[in-house]
Amino acid sequence: MIIEKYNTTDDDNFEIGIFGLGYESRSISCFSQVKDRCRMKLALAYNYWCDKADYKINKEEFESNDCRVIEVDENAIRKDLELNLAQIIQEIKGKVFVDISVMTRHRLSELLWFLFENMISESSIIIAYSIADFVEPPTQNYPVKFFGSIIDSFQPLTGRLNLHPIVVIGLGYEKDKALGAIGHLDPENVIFLIPSNEKEQNYKERLDENNKLLFDNYPKSKSLTYDVLKPYSTYFELKSLILRLKKEHRILLIPLGPKILAVISLIIAWEFSPEINVWRVSSEQLEKPLNRKSSGEYIYIKINI
């Protein structure tokens, strides 16, 4: 597996485009850019919140452009992928376009892991992420309903028990969400992954405000600031950090914050498997739906199989 910098889709055609269908208006943003250059198109829809915000409008846009829409159960994603995609993916020698913008971390992780296992050499995956306009975070804390391996393929490590555990956690702007995750684990060693986007200062302000208790409780923790708009650089920065840590630590990655960090964490976990574990924190359907609009800016990362 080789990771490449990728800046635009303007000159590329794709064997298949795989998109998320949700209620956010940005659900069709990447689709509008590449729909005429995908030989096949598939939208993975949700079977909940189908009456929220722009879901029906988005579904109509996909279906009117010859995109097959399937409702995928959050708890049976792998089975649905095997049923609908396995034969197609195993025959592709070309580019697969995957828009993760409105996919849950669990969903995008199941999909990418499935592609890693099934795609053949001489093929590649283009991961796309539509940057959203700033939306104020929820003002309330939601209870954690799930805290554990991001997918079943990432089970807690049982080996290397002689090494010191360390938690590497991405921060988002949700109030005390990272603090809640850390509180469950009570680790001695923590490293924060802090997202940065110079075009969006409101996000940084809310991130600082809503993680204040975390910073107060772990004042000596190290941190790595990464640029959300530069996933290729972030991949190498995080990989370099993991390489240094894994010599003396058992590493647990928790990629809260922008979903592109979850993609990068998954790639690194695949490369170092089974030494790195990746967990997710979810309040599932308890969180209030927020309709995020596309800012018109897109980021990409290319994975050569």
Image (cartoon, rainbow, N blue to C red):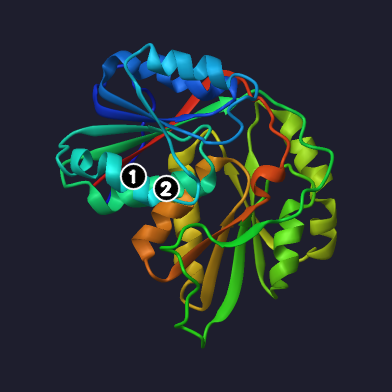
Neighbours of disc 2 within 10 Å: few (<14), some (14-19), many (20+) = some
- In this rendering, position of residue 103 left or right of residue 11: right
Relative to 182, say whether 127 is above or below.
above
Element at label 2: helix
Image point 27% across, 29% down: which residue? 16
> Where does residue 231 sit, x and y in percent of width and height?
47, 40
Element at label 1: helix
Image point 52% across, 75% down: which residue? 250
| Residue 179, image quadrant | bottom right
Depth order, front residue of 300/27: 27
Rendered image: mark on residue 77 = 2
Residue designated by label 1: 81
> Where does residue 62 sit, x and y in percent of width and height?
41, 18
> Where does residue 298 sit, x and y in percent of width and height?
48, 25
For residue 296, say whether it is visible. Answer: no
For residue 135, say whether it is visible. Answer: yes
Callouts 2 and 1 close, C-beta under 8 Å: yes
